[in-house]
Amino acid sequence: MSFFDNLFGRKEVIKHQPEIVFGRYSDSYKTEKEYDAWDKALSFFEEENYLDSYRQFFIYLNDEQQGNVLWKENKGALHFKFFQGSELIEGVANQSTLKAKAKIANAGKLNIGLMRKLLERNFELKYCRFGIDEQNGIYLLFNSYSVDASPYKLYFGLKELATTADKLDDLLLDEFKGLKPDHQEIITPLNDNEKQLKYHFIKEQLTQTIEEAENGKLDATQYPAGIGFLLLATVYKLDFLIKPEGFMMETLERAHRFYYANTSDSPIEKNHDLLKEMASLQTRSKEDFFKEMYRTKSTFGITPSASFSQIKTIIDTHISQMDWYEEEGYDKIALSIPQFIVGHCLFNFAVPLPIKDLFILFYRVTEHPFFDKLGFEPPLVVEEDGKFGIDKGEIKDLLNTIRKRYQDTYPRFHPSISAIEFKKMTRFARSFLIMVRNLDLTKK
């Protein structure tokens, strides 16, 4: 019996998977019931039956798995509330009007810097505006006459209200220390162990990536594209696996925007900007990271849906670029390219659910120490005494589980273990994505 046979004996293992959510919420995965409610909301609106239109609209928004939208009727009006991250949005609608608001923070004392920031943000909004009450509570507001409140306008107006308020509250609290939060009863902090593990993963990834970019074997001046893959792969990985809020989320988004901005900056300059953003995260305190680690409910997603053909195009565009780096012995850069592909897809799009599950499995192998520490069982990779092994049998079982999960919707979806290589991590990563690229996601 070989070393790897001993290493991965096919024993019966009790498989416990912790309840950890990866990636940002998406409202792209609607059910038939919800799509039917949308059609009814449109019909009722055309008939000027606005209350019934609102009722169906809230059914469309509600995700029954998390119960993110609540409403009740009282004296001819619908009183509603829904959740978006750390924000609670409340409102009332009747036959004439709809009004909604989100409280962002409490300001003990207003100052010029804060007021200027809110005024600048006002100009960026299409549907909403800021308001301040008599107690210096800061709100974001959305109002509409019912005759103008089509489901389309409601969707985009309430989405702007919810997503802007959710992002802005943590950013303002971080910038203006005199502000007090107003969402403690909405969020659920992560347990201390999960916080610690995520914090150490963040610091480890940033340290290793910066060290490799600045002092690794690859000449950063001669091969800036390879360094760019390495940096962006880490940006996307941290966004998906940590699911950050506030300052860290904004920093990762800004890094992405800077790199893809249509400017005259060279790839070397763009890499320098990415390293600056990473350094700003690396120097943050544990306490600052911890205060942005919590669970929430959400109603609106911020990423558009992507078709499977788009995912295949991204794989086809980039996967072969890893070959030269692997052949020349730059394995860390080579591995970062398939990680970039997976991260880029998950950061920019709501990918089809079967593909999302496969991408999580990809990360579970390529970032196995992190998943093992989080409590995912059994371990999929073992590195011992200089020998490396990926549990082929367990990967096969997990692929089969994912296939069964979606076979009613995608009867031709058959992820194949035979297409995957297991000798080294770079070979696994490349062949895994080629296997994904060759799948058939034709619906019934």
Image (spheres, rainbow, N blue to C red):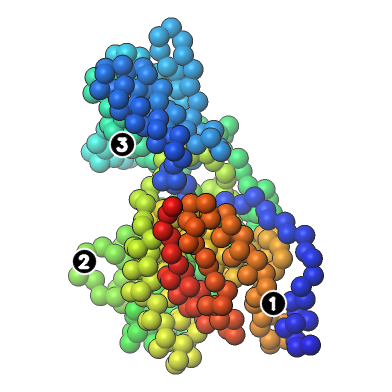
Which label sits in the foreground, 2 or 1?
1
Observer-nearest of 45 and 182: 45
Q: Residue 263 carries which label?
A: 2
Element carrying mark 2: loop
Observer-nearest of 164 and 132: 164
Say whether marks 2 and 3 touch (CB < 8 Å): no
Mark closest to the chain's N terminus, 2 or 1: 2
Question: x, y percentage for residue 287?
Answer: 59, 51
Observer-nearest of 341 and 65: 65
Q: Mark 3 points at which residue?
A: 156
The residue lying at 53 percent from left, 67 percent from top is 415
Q: Is residue 212 left or right of residue 163?
A: right
Say whether marks 2 and 1 touch (CB < 8 Å): no
Whether residue 356 is visible, yes or no, is: no
Q: Which mark is residue 382?
A: 1
Question: x, y percentage for residue 78?
Answer: 42, 17
Question: x, y percentage for residue 44?
Answer: 31, 21
Observer-nearest of 408 and 23: 408
Say whether marks 3 and 1 touch (CB < 8 Å): no
Mark closest to the chain's N terminus, 2 or 3: 3
Mark closest to the chain's N terminus, 3 or 1: 3
Q: Say which quarter of the image contains residue 144.
A: top left
Question: 10 Å neighbourhood of mark 1: few (<14), some, or many (≥20)?
Answer: some
The amino acid type of the residue labelled 1 equals Val
The residue lying at 30 percent from left, 28 percent from top is 42
The amino acid type of the residue labelled 2 equals Thr
What is the CA distance from the residue labelled 2 to the residue labelled 1? 44 Å
Q: Say which quarter of the image contains residue 379.
A: bottom right
